[in-house]
Image (cartoon, rainbow, N blue to C red):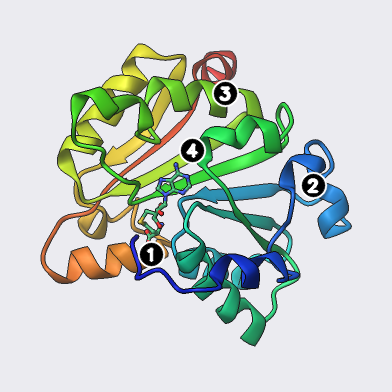
């Protein structure tokens, strides 16, 4: 998500109590931020945070953390959170590549990736949030029984993601190429801002859910 640069947004974020400053200092200690041991669910590339705000309101027993790299975008989310504070939601301004500096081994219970940047050029493939490189990072921070949910309208990115999963130690639990017409997967679906925008112009929404292969084999 790109917004015109808002002058002073970095400074405004630095003073905002809903935005975690120096998040790497909290590695392994996120429960202390929320003052409870509830599960931690994160969205990487949250944009203005609408999806997480809806989830946080619905599920007070879960702690949510939104990650966004652009100050101007994040500031919009923070302004909304100030109007309607949610004790179980915090935001971080950071690059997703730093994720293992901020979360400890198995500290996260669920990862959401919604409408991630497609990085269409082959030479940028490792920057895609569903590349093998990113799956290796998620493999560290996610609990063994944790899941990753990914939505996009970008068919090339979706196909790439399915291929990366095949090569990895992740298990494809379910997927659809038209979420809004999938009677099972659409249940309880919360639309993100991009999802509303792209589905309104007729783009089908793709979704996949993955978990650890080893974990699945043990259950079967
Ligand atoms: N999830 C939102 C926004 C999608 S746009 C929605 O579905 O409506 C993708 C967002 O991810 C943008 O705001 C972009 O700035 C952010 N983003 C992309 N790559 C990122 C990265 N490597 N680290 C952190 N944020 C990233």
Residue 55 picture location, percent across and down: 56, 65
Secondary structure of residue under mark 3? helix
Can you name the residue that lies furthest to the front here?
Answer: 7
* Furthest residue toward left: 202
Write the residue at 52% across / 40% down: 96
Task: Give the crowd class for mark 3: few <14, some 14-19, many >=20 residues within 10 Å.
Answer: some
Q: Please tell me whether mark 1 sits on a helix, a strand or a loop.
A: loop
- Which of the two residues, 193 or 10, is positioned nearer the viewer here? 10
Residue under numbered circle 3: 139
Which class describes the residues within 10 Å of circle 1: few (<14), some (14-19), or many (20+)? many
Q: Earlier in the sequence, mark 3 or mark 1?
A: 3
Element assignment for label 4: strand
Residue lying at 40% horizontally and 36% vertically, measured from the top left: 129
Q: CA distance from mark 3 to mark 2?
A: 18 Å
Measured in 3D between alpha carbons, the distance from the residue under mark 4 to the one under mark 3, in whole angstroms, is 10 Å
**Mark 4–mark 1 distance (CA, rounded to whole Å):** 16 Å
Left or right of 203 on screen, residue 76: right
Picture coordinates of residue 214, whole percent (x, y): 55, 14
Q: Is residue 6 above or below residue 112?
A: below
């Amino acid at each position: 998500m790109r917004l015109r640069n808002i002058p002073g947004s970095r400074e405004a974020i630095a003073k905002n109590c809903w935005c975690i400053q120096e998040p790497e200092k909290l590695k392994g200690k996120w429960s202390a931020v929320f003052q409870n041991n509830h599960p931690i669910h994160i969205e990487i590339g949250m944009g203005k945070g609408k999806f997480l705000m809806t989830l946080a309101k619905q599920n007070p027993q879960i702690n949510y953390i939104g990650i966004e790299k652009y100050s101007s975008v994040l500031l919009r989310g923070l302004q909304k959170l100030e109007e309607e504070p949610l004790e179980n939601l915090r935001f971080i301004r950071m690059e997703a590549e730093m994720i293992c500096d901020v979360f400890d081994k198995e500290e996260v219970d669920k990862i959401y990736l919604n409408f991630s940047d497609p990085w269409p050029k082959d030479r940028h493939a490792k920057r895609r949030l569903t590349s093998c490189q990113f799956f290796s990072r998620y493999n560290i921070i996610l609990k063994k029984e944790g899941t990753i949910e990914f939505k996009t309208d970008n068919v090339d990115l979706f196909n790439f993601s399915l291929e990366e999963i095949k090569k990895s130690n992740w298990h494809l639990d379910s997927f659809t190429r038209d979420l809004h017409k999938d009677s099972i997967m659409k249940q309880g679906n919360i639309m993100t801002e991009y999802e509303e925008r792209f589905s309104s112009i007729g783009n089908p929404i793709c979704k996949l859910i993955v978990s650890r292969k080893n974990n699945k084999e043990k259950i079967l």
